[in-house]
Amino acid sequence: LILETVKVASVIDVGCGVGTWLSVFGERGIDDMLGIDGDYVPRERLEIEPRQFWSADLAEPIEVGRRFDLAVSLEVAEHLPSSCNEQFVATLVGLSDLVLFSAAIPRQGGSEHLNERWQSWWARRFADHGYAPVDCIRRRVWSNPAVEWWYAQNTLLYAAPARLAENSHLKAEYELMGTAQLDVVHPARYLKWRKRLREMLSSSAGP
């Protein structure tokens, strides 16, 4: 869907894990790509070439000496200390004029979540750098069972002003959705919350 929306020949994934997202870009013909994550990532499990992986502390500033057509960071920021929020966004916008970004919302839940924020909160951090949220993905995958609900719920494309100005399709998507309804909760997450609440109430009620 991203490749249908913007022209991409190079991609960097910050918080890439074993490089799964990058491997799919590779299947689409993109070979200029780089994945960055911690030294804990097992190299034998990489889904990209070892030369395409850099080890770095994501809580620290990251510089690679170049920019890419697209930067990706999906469900990563919630794992980082809140003290590095502004710095992390600065890293992403320093890598590309287009940033595909998602992060867990409050009470989303998950392993080692330290920093859950609403989508609009992150949008304000990107706005500090002039980047606008283009909500061009969520409605297209919202009801697709093949897409995990947290990606459908949280994924936004942030664009620098120049990219909006030169890409009429991107600009139209931005104008269509605007920024009034960035904060949303997917029905799948809501139903899990509701089920858990019922179980808690039933347990507390006793026999």
Image (cartoon, rainbow, N blue to C red):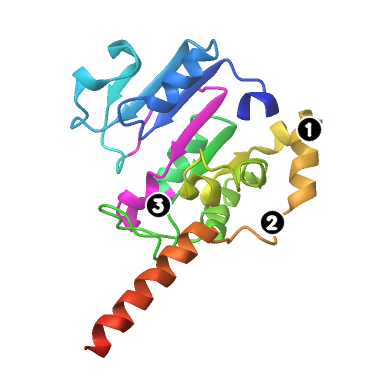
Residue 82 drawn in magenta: yes
Report how far apart the C-alphas of labels 3 and 1 lie in the structure. Answer: 30 Å
- Which residue is nearer to you in this view: 9 or 151? 151
Residue under circle 1?
169
Residue 88 against residue 72 in the figure, above or below: below
**Residue 140 in which image quadrant:** top right
User: Percent from the top left, x then y, of residue 120?
Assistant: 57, 59
What's the residue type where badge 1 is placed?
His
The number of discs equals 3
How far apart are the alpha carbons under marks 2 and 3? 21 Å
Magenta span: 61-86
As helix, strand or loop, the secondary structure at mark 1 comes to: helix
x and y percentages locating residue 129 in the rendered image: 58, 45
Q: Residue 79: percent from the left, percent from the top? A: 31, 49
Cα gap from disc 1 to disc 2, whole angstroms? 17 Å
Contact between marks 2 and 3 (CB within 8 A): the answer is: no
Q: Earlier in the sequence, mark 3 or mark 1?
A: 3
> Is residue 120 something one can see in this rendering?
yes
Q: Quadrant of the C terminus?
A: bottom left
